[in-house]
């Protein structure tokens, strides 16, 4: 059951043993069938989001077919795969290192996480720096959230997602913290901050957050962008919460972004400063997976 879900979600493909004529005939058939189906579907009364998702699915199918027909796989090691894993991404920035993964989750997976989290939501808290208190930091982070381990999900959905994240970033699942599922309602936000912990501010750390994988579980109508105020800007004068300045990212439901909080030498990247803009219209749901440099027990 889980293996089938993994296969469909990650788009694994073994090299088919087809002759060239059969391959051409097969590709032509799927192209014509896809064109006919797309016209039929788009003629129906569907929302703009549904049409956008269908168009993106057709684009991904074209890429998948090209990969199937083009590449010969190499022999894999004992821990490797004998198939291709297709997880498309876009480089959003090199400063900070940030990637965008369209269609990383299905709509069903997104809703499953939301349904798990809803009964347990509590006001979000902050890791406090030296000298800070809950009172002095009030208003910095106004969302509600909860933490959940993949082992707590009896359906196996969170385990499948963790395994896909590990493949996307090539860091084992054992380095991930629990999922932090967050809901932002109208007016709620999270001011500019770092996910990595500076020992000079937070004290000695047994491990460090090196990357953040952010899953977008809902569409939100206005506001709610994830912004990187320092993106490629060495002359930063300050973050403006009202303007929500910087590189602003607003993915769709099921999309994900990855950004690295540290450089390869494990020092904190100043450009990884980021914020969640306040929601103006709608409701924003996300799930955060923080990745550390040490195995998490």
Image (cartoon, helix red, strand yellow):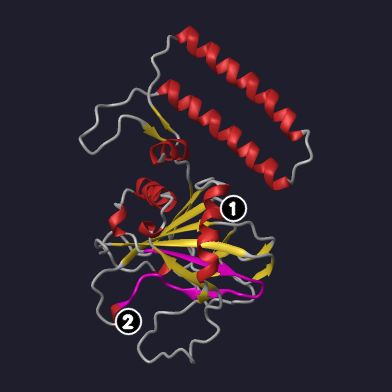
| Label 1 crowd (10 A; few <14 / some 14-19 / many >=20) | many
Quarter placement of the N terminus: top left
- Which of the 4 image quadrants contains residue 103? top right
Relative image position of residue 118 (x, y in whole percent): 55, 66
Q: Position of residue 7 (x, y in %)?
A: 42, 36
Residue located beneath label 2 in the image: 202
Q: Could you tell me residue 66's position as x and y percent?
A: 48, 25
Task: Tell me: residue 240, above or below residue 74.
Answer: below
Q: Which residue has dot 1 on it?
A: 253
Residue 290 among those drawn in magenta: no
Asked whether residue 86 appears in the rendered view, the answer is no
The quarter of the image holding the C terminus is bottom left
Residue at disc 2, secondary structure: helix
Q: Which residues are magenta?
A: 178-198
- Toward the left, the furthest residue is 78
Mark 2 or mark 1, which has the lower sequence index? 2
Look at 34% across and 69% down and name the residue there. Answer: 268
Which image quadrant is residue 251 in?
bottom right
Q: Is residue 65 left or right of residue 199?
A: right
Left or right? Give the position of 156 relative to 231.
left
182 drawn magenta: yes
Q: Identify the residue at image location x=51%, y=30%.
A: 63
What residue is shown at x 32% (from left), y 82% (from top)?
A: 202
Q: CA distance from mark 2 to mark 1?
A: 34 Å
Mark 1, secondary structure of its residue: loop
**What residue lies at 29% left-to-right and 68% top-to-bottom?**
208
């Amino acid at each position: 059951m889980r293996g089938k879900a993994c296969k469909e979600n990650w788009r694994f493909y073994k090299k088919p043993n087809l002759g060239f004529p059969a391959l051409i005939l097969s590709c032509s058939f799927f192209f014509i069938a896809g064109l006919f189906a797309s016209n039929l579907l788009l003629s129906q009364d569907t929302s703009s989001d549904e049409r956008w998702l269908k168009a993106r699915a057709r684009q991904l199918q074209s890429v998948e077919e090209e990969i199937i027909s083009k590449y010969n796989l190499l022999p894999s090691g004992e821990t490797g795969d004998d198939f291709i894993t297709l997880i498309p991404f876009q480089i959003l920035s090199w400063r900070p290192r940030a990637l965008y993964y369209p269609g990383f989750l299905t709509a069903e997976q997104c809703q499953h996480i939301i349904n798990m989290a809803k009964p347990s939501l509590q006001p979000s808290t902050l890791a406090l720096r030296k000298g800070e208190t809950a009172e002095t930091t009030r208003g910095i982070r106004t969302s509600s959230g909860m933490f959940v381990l993949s082992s707590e999900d009896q359906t196996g959905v969170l385990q499948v997602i963790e395994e896909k994240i590990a493949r996307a970033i090539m860091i084992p699942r054992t380095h991930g913290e629990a999922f932090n599922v967050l809901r932002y309602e109208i007016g709620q936000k999270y001011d500019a901050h770092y996910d990595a912990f500076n020992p000079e501010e937070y004290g000695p750390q047994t491990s460090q957050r090196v990357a953040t994988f952010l899953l977008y579980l809902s569409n939100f109508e206005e506001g709610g962008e994830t912004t990187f105020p320092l993106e490629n800007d060495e002359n930063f004068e300050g973050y403006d919460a009202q303007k929500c300045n910087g590189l602003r990212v607003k993915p769709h439901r099921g999309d994900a972004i990855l950004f690295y909080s540290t450089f390869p030498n494990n020092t904190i990247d100043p450009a990884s400063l980021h914020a969640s803009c306040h929601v103006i219209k709608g409701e924003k749901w996300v799930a955060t997976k923080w990745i550390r440099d040490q195995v998490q027990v």
